Structure formats: C-alpha cells, structure tokens
C-alpha cells in the first residue's frame, strides 16, 4: 500500500494555520478590493475538493489504498479553502464566501474512467502549483503572498502522490494505463487550446449542462480567465513550465523522452494500438 508512507510524508510537511501563517505581518495598504475578490473566488473554487472527493471514492470503490489517501488529500484541499477564507475573515470580512456560494460548487460528477481521472488530477495539481506561484508573485501584501506560496507547495506534493499511484497503475494495468495517461497528457499539454484546461473548468455532468463546471457555478463564472490573463499574467512562460513538468514526469514514468506534446501524441497512438 502507498497510503501509509504518503500519510507520513504529508504529515511531516503539514503546516498550522494558527502558528505558521504570519498573520501579524498583514499590511492593509497592500491589499486592494480587486485582489481580495480573487482570493474569494479561489476560496470557493478550492471548496470543490468536496465533490471531487465524492467522485474519487465512488469511482475507486475497489481501491481502498487510493480511497484512504483521499482522506489526506481532501483534508489539505479543504484547508486551502479555509485559510483563504480565514484571510478574508480577518482582513476583508465582507468578502467571505457565504455557505450558499460554497455549496453551489457541490454537485455530482458523472462517472468517469478511474485511470483518466487520475491523470487529469495529476495534471491539475501541476497546473495549480504554477497558478499559485504566479498569484504569490502578483500580490504585494505579505500574508497572502505567503499563503499562496504555502498552498502551492501542497499542490506540488499532491501531484507527487498522484504520480506514485500512476506508477502503481502502470505495474497493474500495463498498456491500458499507458494509453489512458498519454491520452490525457496530450490534452493537458496542448498549448493550442483556447483556454488552460483544469479539472475545475471541464464539463463533468450531462444532467447539469451547461452549468456543469465548477467555474460556471462561481458568483463570477468568467473570473478565472480574467485572473489568469489580466491579473496574475499567466503567460507563455508560466504555461511552458506546466507543460514541461507534465512531459518531464511522463518521460520518467514511461522511460521515454518527450520534448513536446507532439512527441507524447506519437506515443499515445502507439499505446492506443498496444492496448486495443
């Protein structure tokens, strides 16, 4: 089982919201209402770990190891939402999300293949790591800068945990896992798509379409694009880091070298044939 060792490693890295966040360093002159609004939206978005966990537990009912790991992942992701809300509670109380706004992002996701979902969330953690690093650079207020740096490191660790489960899946499912991971990898590393793909802006429920993405259920459904393009300026350099990290990890996972998404796509076609 992977869960016992992953629990130990994440436990060692765990931070305290009370003692590790430098709340006393807050500088009100360095926080604008515009910035506080983005913190509010991220707090609501992070709350979507709740329906994601329900999805994982449902679709991995036969995998107690991975399901047990969800207990830690869920705790830490909800903690991200909580620390962002605590920041607002202390310094912009009028902007704290309401319970109704939080509950709006809890809805049932359609069942999906477990291997593809695993890879999708690995890529999501890689992307979120960089989003939060960029957010930390954009902000000038020291406490929120520290918070974004802190939760970015959490997301990076989560990506590493998902990668371990991906390696286990390769051992257990062989070519089927290769094909699944390569398919999603090509999708997530494709810089030519109109928007950056992340689990929170993908359609996940036919019943609720078109309001079946996490982002579509936020108070401002269009905020993410504006945040990325006009506020934290998540440009080609940042995007290149996401793609490079996905390709680097898949290169190690498959013992192949992928310099570009096109390289990975060729491998995807080979894997699709091998797994057929």
Image (spheres, rainbow, N blue to C red):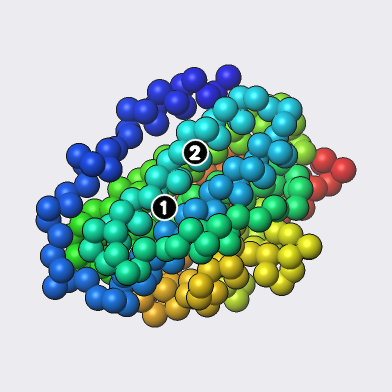
Crowdedness near tag 1: few (<14), some (14–19) or many (≥20) residues, C-alpha within 10 Å: many
User: Dot 1: what SS?
Assistant: helix
User: Dot 2: what SS?
Assistant: helix
Residue lying at the far right of the rendered structure: 276
Looking at the picture, how far across and down is residue 29, in whole percent?
14, 73
| Residue at the spot 15% in from the left edge and 69% down from the top edge | 28
Ranked by sequence position, the earlier of labels 2 and 1 is 2
Q: Is residue 259 visible?
A: no
Is disc 2 in contact with disc 1, using a CB cutoff of under 8 Å? no
Looking at the picture, how far across and down is residue 226, in whole percent?
45, 78
- Residue 59 occupies which quadrant of the picture? top right
Tell me if residue 146 comes above or below residue 222 in the rendering. above
- Mark 1 lies on residue: 81
Q: On the rendered structure, is 205 left or right of 83?
A: right
Alpha carbon distance from label 2 to label 1: 13 Å
Q: Is residue 271 visible?
A: yes
Q: Nearer the viewer, residue 190 or 52?
A: 52
Mark number, residue 16: none
Q: Nearer the viewer, mark 2 or mark 1?
A: 1
Q: On the rendered structure, is 92 left or right of 67?
A: left
- Mark 2 lies on residue: 73
Q: Which quadrant of the rendered structure holds the N terminus?
A: top right
Tell me if residue 104 comes above or below residue 16 in the rendering. below
């Amino acid at each position: 089982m992977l869960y016992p060792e992953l629990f130990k490693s994440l436990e060692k890295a765990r931070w305290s919201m009370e003692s590790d966040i430098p709340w006393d360093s807050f500088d009100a002159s360095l926080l604008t209402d515009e910035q506080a609004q983005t913190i509010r939206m991220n707090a609501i978005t992070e709350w979507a770990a709740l329906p994601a966990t329900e999805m994982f537990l449902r679709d991995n009912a036969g995998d107690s190891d991975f399901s047990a790991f969800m207990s830690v992942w869920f705790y830490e992701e909800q903690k991200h939402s909580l620390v962002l809300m605590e920041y607002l509670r202390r310094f912009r109380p009028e902007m704290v999300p309401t319970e109704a706004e939080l509950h709006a992002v809890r809805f049932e996701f359609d069942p999906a293949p477990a291997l593809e979902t695993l890879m999708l969330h690995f890529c999501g953690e890689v992307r979120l790591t960089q989003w939060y690093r960029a957010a930390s650079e954009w902000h000038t207020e020291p406490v929120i800068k520290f918070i974004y740096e802190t939760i970015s490191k959490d997301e990076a660790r989560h990506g590493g945990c998902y990668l371990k489960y991906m390696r286990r899946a390769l051992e257990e499912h062989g070519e089927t896992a290769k094909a699944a991971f390569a398919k999603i990898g090509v999708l997530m590393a494709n810089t030519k798509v109109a928007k950056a793909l992340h689990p929170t802006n993908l359609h996940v429920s036919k019943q609720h379409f078109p309001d079946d993405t996490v982002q579509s259920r936020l108070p401002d459904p269009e905020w993410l694009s504006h945040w990325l393009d006009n506020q934290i300026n998540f440009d080609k350099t940042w995007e290149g880091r996401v793609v490079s990290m996905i390709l680097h990890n898949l290169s190690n996972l498959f013992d192949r070298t992928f310099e570009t998404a096109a390289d990975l796509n060729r491998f995807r076609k080979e894997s699709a044939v091998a797994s057929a």
